[in-house]
Amino acid sequence: MNLKMRMTSALMALIVLTTPGFGAPTILHDPIKAAEKAKPLGVRATVRDAAARVESVSLFYASSRGMTPFRADMTGSGAGVWLATIPGHLMGPGDQMFYYIQAENADGETRETEWHTIKLVESGVAPAAIPSATEVARQAQREATPRPAPVPAPAPPPRTSRSKYLVPAAVIVGGAVAVGGALAIANHDSGGGGGGGDGGTGTVTNGNFGGTYDICFTPSAGTNSSTVCDNGLVNIYVSNGALEIVGLWDAEVLTASLSGNSFTAVKAVAATVQFPAAQLIVSGEFNGPSCTARVDGYSTDPLAPGNFSGRLNTTRR
């Protein structure tokens, strides 16, 4: 009886070990739904294998399912995360891009995702026309649904200094500490009369503002890296005086509370394909149908020190 059981167990083990795909890597990936034409697109996946070391991960992409796809080796960045980029000159002129991801372990076992389809849109298309890539962005869009106008908020108290946007003191910028009561991000524009703050347009409490952003990362002196920039579409949603910025930094949503028609949003954000992890400071002001903001920040990655700068330009939708 014992001999029969041992033979049965050995046979089952042999079947499992020779079954194709057993022990193959596991690929975790959130499919990309939409992207801009002519802009490089970063693709990220998490690959794990409990049985063997992950040997390689590849990205295959093509503008048509009928053509032989291009192949790009994905680069491991630690914790099982692998990254690759689809070049901007291949993003278009068609309206779709197709891709899938393949992983192979040290035993030669492979696994592939299914083909994913990306909708390509022209640069400058209203952000609302681009499908949201995450539930966070979708929730932000739902929150932007117009609501009955609330009772106007009282006018903000007059400012006594020439600093428009203030951030709490002791902000570390590129390794240096700015000490004091507050860090002034920008100064008031000079002009006759002064003190109005909103130019007679009223305080913004609800609305959807869409437009573009530009942001650049400048490495600290002494590094071998050069300045890296990015630009794209961004939305600013205002609901009952609470503000959300969607689209500036991958799926991150920056939040702030309005003070009159001004705001300052501060958030620690994770690394992206292009930029290191960072502390971002977005300071802006609503002026009639438009909202402009300045982007400042610094890298929180000790291996990639440097500072961020940029700008948001939006108009009411």
Image (cartoon, rainbow, N blue to C red):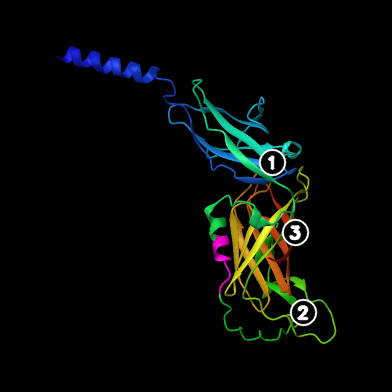
At x 66%, y 61%, the residue is: 235
Residue 248 vs 162, above or below: the answer is above
Image position, residue 238 (x, y; %): 61, 69
- Say if residue 241 shows up in the picture: yes
Name above or below for residue 268 compared with residue 1. below
Of mark 1 and mark 3, the one earlier in the sequence is 1
User: Which mark lies nearer to you, 1 or 3?
Assistant: 1
Position of 42 compared to 200: left or right?
Answer: left
| SS at circle 3 | strand
Residue 60's quadrant in the figure? top right
Q: Amino acid at mark 2?
A: Arg
Q: CA distance from mark 1 to mark 3?
A: 29 Å
Please report the bounds of the magenta region as a residue range: 140-147
**Which residue was labeled with disc 3?**
310
Q: Position of residue 242 (x, y in %)?
A: 58, 71
Q: Position of residue 200 (x, y in %)?
A: 74, 83
User: Which label belongs to residue 162?
Assistant: 2
* Residue 145 inside the magenta-drawn segment: yes
Tag 2: Cα neighbours inside 10 Å, few (<14), some, or many (≥20)? few
Depth check, mark 2 against mark 1: the one in front is 1
In the picture, the disc for residue 95 is 1
Whole-percent x, y for residue 167 in the image: 66, 70
Question: Foreground: 61 or 42?
Answer: 61
Q: Secondary structure at mark 2?
A: loop
Name the N-terminal-most of marks 2 and 3.
2
Q: Is residue 232 magenta?
A: no
For residue 268, what is the image quadrant?
bottom right
Q: Amino acid at mark 1?
A: Asp
